[in-house]
Image (cartoon, rainbow, N blue to C red):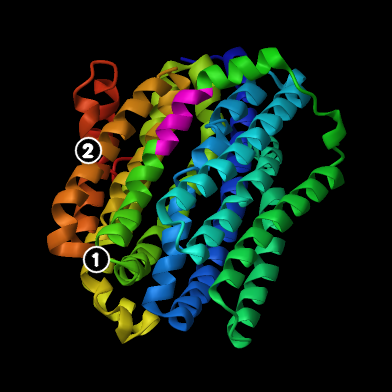
């Protein structure tokens, strides 16, 4: 039984826990509001662009986006979650951590532009429009170095400042894209608009950081911190590369094996299916600092928080996937028009990838906290290999439907089933199994 003295000792802990919970809820609320707004406006503008360009040109644009995405991990270097963990743990050296992360990302961005442009020129040097689309879209990786500012706000559970900064850029560029449609602008103009959004977002982030009383000029480079960050992040970088491969390789393989029209059809379905992926990202980015903090103080609390996160994400993914399966045809034809009618079956299958995407996001903090980021890389590498092999087998016969089947199966294996194989991840596998009981208190 607790006496009066012990109860008084617990009061500060309860107050801190309450304030932490309120901060997480508020932070998640801002992220949700931002992403819901982006989802609604973004999908309306994307549909308008898809209808305007038609399946062929829309497919060409999405082929370029997917191709650039293959090189995006070299711009990010897998630094985000690692840097946030170090900022939370060593806040006294935040300027050095942020500065080092920024310059690593900047150099990575330059490298990704050169790699992407050289690769597409080697593959399609006779298709000048394709080369220009990739070169323009890849340049956004340089400006994404300023997302380092978001890592500070994220570590402080203050994502509302990032939300405000990026929403301003998003709204302005969305208006620009609508103007481009009205003016009957060429395809390449939409690539420039995409680059402008990232650049404007970087400027707005820098302004928000300054308004909060911080200065970018205080950031400094540390070779020792760079070695430490990169030592922990390089497996996540290659893990991110393999994630991108099995998220985007289907569109690239469809473009090479079938044609741009098939990419356009598949992209329309994937656009509706993947629009929900912001949900686990928003929740996890707010909860991850609390999971890292619990790991350092209370193992039981640490696993309880991961389990609660997984149960919530699994429930949300099923709530989304079930109704979308049955109304996929109506959604596709209503939004994109009859030209995209073949996307119905693709959407009905592809939407179930969300279950394993949500689970994968929910387990990512466990791999970082346990120092097992190399295992995270291996699981996604195996998933990517499975996806490529299944695409080679299924796309020639089933085109976009085959690509959707390959995506769902590879996500299920790499984000869930593979955890049952390795001894170090079996505990996580059983935690995932138990998390399907999402009605537990």
Vertical side of 30 occupied by 415: above or below: above
| Pointer 2 residue | 413
Lower position in the chain sequence, tag 1 or tag 2: 1
> Which type of secondary structure does the marked residue at label 2 adopt?
helix
Residue 237 lies in the magenta stretch: yes
Res. 312 visible in picture: no
Residue 62: horizontal and vertical position, in percent?
43, 63
Crowding near the residue tagged with mark 1, few <14, some 14–19, many ≥20 C-alpha atoms within 10 Å: many
Looking at the image, residue 285 sits to the left or right of residue 307; the answer is right
| Residue at the image position 39 percent from the left and 25 percent from the top | 303
Quadrant containing the C terminus is top left
Q: Quadrant of residue 418?
A: top left
Residue drawn at point x = 19 percent, y = 50 percent = 392
Extreme residue in the front direction: 126
CA distance for labels 1 and 2? 20 Å
- Give how far across and how far down residue 216 sits, in percent: 83, 36
Q: In this view, does 167 lie above or below 56?
A: above
Q: Which residue is depicted at the point 28% across and 52% down?
A: 353
Q: Toward the viewer: 202 or 59?
A: 59
Magenta region, residue range: 233-241
Up the image or down, 90 lies above or below 281; here it is above
Query: Taken as a whole, is the magenta stretch helix, strand or loop?
Result: helix
Residue at the image position 20 percent from the left and 63 percent from the top: 399
Question: Which of the 4 image quadrants contains residue 362?
Answer: top left
Of residues 280 and 310, the one drawn nearer to the viewer in this rendering: 280
Query: Compared with residue 388, is residue 377 higher up or lower down, i.e. above or below?
Result: above
In this figure, which residue is indicated by the disc labeled 1?
346
- Label 2: how many Cα within 10 Å (few below 14, some 14–19, many 20+): some
Of the pair 393 and 349, the residue shown nearer to us: 393
Q: What element carries label 1?
A: helix
Where residue 114 appears, as percent x and y from the top left, is 58, 42
């Amino acid at each position: 039984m607790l006496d009066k003295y012990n109860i008084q000792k617990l009061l500060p802990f309860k107050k801190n826990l309450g304030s932490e919970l309120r901060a997480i809820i508020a932070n998640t609320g801002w992220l949700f509001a931002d992403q819901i707004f982006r989802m609604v406006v973004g999908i309306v503008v994307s549909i308008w662009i898809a209808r305007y360009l038609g399946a062929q040109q829309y497919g060409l644009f999405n082929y370029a986006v997917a191709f650039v995405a293959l090189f995006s991990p070299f711009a990010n270097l897998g630094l985000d979650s690692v840097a946030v963990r170090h900022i939370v743990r060593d806040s006294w050296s935040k300027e050095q951590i942020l500065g080092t992360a920024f310059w690593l990302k900047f150099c990575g961005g330059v490298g990704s532009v050169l790699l992407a442009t050289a690769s597409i020129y080697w593959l399609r040097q006779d298709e000048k429009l394709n080369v220009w689309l990739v070169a323009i879209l890849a340049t956004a990786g340089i400006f994404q170095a300023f997302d380092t500012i978001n890592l500070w706000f994220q570590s402080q559970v203050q994502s509302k400042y990032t939300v405000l900064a990026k929403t301003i850029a998003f709204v302005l560029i969305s208006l620009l894209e609508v103007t481009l449609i009205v003016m009957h602008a060429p395809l390449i103009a939409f690539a420039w608009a995409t680059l402008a959004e990232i650049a404007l977002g970087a400027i707005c982030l820098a302004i928000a950081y300054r308004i909060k009383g911080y200065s970018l000029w205080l950031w400094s480079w540390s070779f020792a911190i760079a070695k430490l960050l990169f030592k922990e992040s390089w497996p996540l970088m290659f893990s991110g590369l393999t994630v991108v491969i099995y998220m985007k390789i289907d569109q690239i393989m469809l473009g090479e094996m079938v044609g741009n029209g098939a990419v356009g059809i598949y992209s329309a379905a994937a656009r509706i299916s993947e629009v929900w992926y912001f949900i686990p990202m928003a929740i996890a980015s707010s909860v991850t600092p609390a999971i890292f903090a619990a790991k350092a103080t209370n193992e039981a609390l640490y696993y309880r928080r991961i389990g609660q996160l997984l149960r919530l994400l699994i429930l949300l993914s099923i709530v989304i996937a079930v109704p979308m399966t049955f109304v996929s045809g109506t959604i596709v034809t209503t939004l994109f028009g009859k030209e995209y009618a073949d996307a119905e079956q693709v959407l009905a299958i592809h939407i179930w990838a969300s279950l394993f995407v949500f689970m994968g996001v929910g387990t990512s903090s466990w791999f970082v906290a346990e120092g097992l980021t190399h295992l995270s890389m291996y699981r996604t590498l195996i998933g990517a290999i499975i996806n490529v092999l299944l695409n080679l087998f299924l796309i020639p016969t089933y085109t976009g439907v085959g690509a959707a089947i390959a995506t769902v199966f590879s996500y299920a294996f790499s984000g869930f089933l593979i955890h049952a194989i390795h001894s170090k991840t079996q505990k996580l596998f059983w935690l995932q199994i138990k998390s399907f009981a999402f009605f537990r208190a």
